[in-house]
Image (cartoon, grey):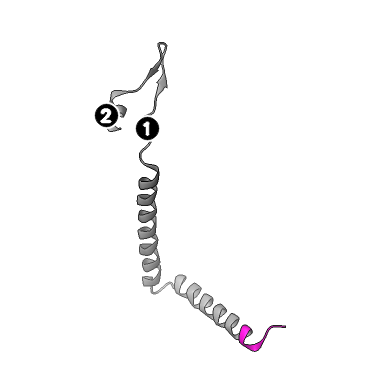
């Protein structure tokens, strides 16, 4: 059986979760949702930057021709 303090901490967590959900679905005031969206956008841009630094740019695509492999000049110039 859980102690009184463990149950009270769990109950506080449920209260915080309920308040969060009520703030998200509030039809009158959407500032909480806008703040969440702004934070998510910042996180996604940081992830994109980190991915670009770690993995670099992709090599230009090639295609098979009758005489061998060919890389288009436009693709090669962008590489």
| First in residue order: circle 2 vs circle 1 | 1
Q: Camera-side residue: 35 or 74? A: 74
State how far apart marks 2 and 1 are (Cα): 11 Å
Q: Is residue 27 left or right of residue 76?
A: right
Q: Bounds of the magenta span?
A: 1-6
Image quarter of the N terminus = bottom right
Q: Camera-side residue: 38 or 57? A: 57
Using the image, determine if residue 52 lies above or below residue 58.
below
User: Any mark on residue 77, and which?
Assistant: 2
Residue 14 forms part of the magenta stretch: no
Secondary element under disc 2, as helix, strand or loop, is helix
Locate residue 49, reporting x and y percent. 35, 50
Q: Camera-side residue: 44 or 57? A: 57
Q: Is residue 5 left or right of residue 25?
A: right
At a point 36% along the width and 30% down the height, the residue shown is: 60
User: Any mark on residue 26, and which?
Assistant: none
User: Any mark on residue 59, and which?
Assistant: 1
Q: Camera-side residue: 14 or 24? A: 14
Locate residue 21, reporting x and y percent. 50, 72
Using the image, determine if residue 49 lies above or below residue 13.
above
At a point 37% along the width and 64% down the height, the residue shown is: 39
- The quarter holding residue 4 reads bottom right
At a point 40% along the width and 66% down the height, the residue shown is: 36
Locate residue 3, reporting x and y percent. 67, 86
């Amino acid at each position: 059986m859980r102690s009184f303090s463990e149950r009270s901490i769990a109950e506080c967590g449920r209260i915080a979760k309920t308040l969060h959900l009520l703030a998200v679905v509030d039809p009158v005031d959407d500032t909480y949702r806008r703040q969440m969206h702004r934070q998510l956008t910042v996180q996604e841009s940081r992830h994109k930057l980190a991915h670009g630094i770690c993995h670099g740019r992709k090599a230009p695509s090639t295609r098979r021709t009758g005489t061998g492999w060919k890389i288009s000049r436009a693709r090669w110039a962008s590489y």
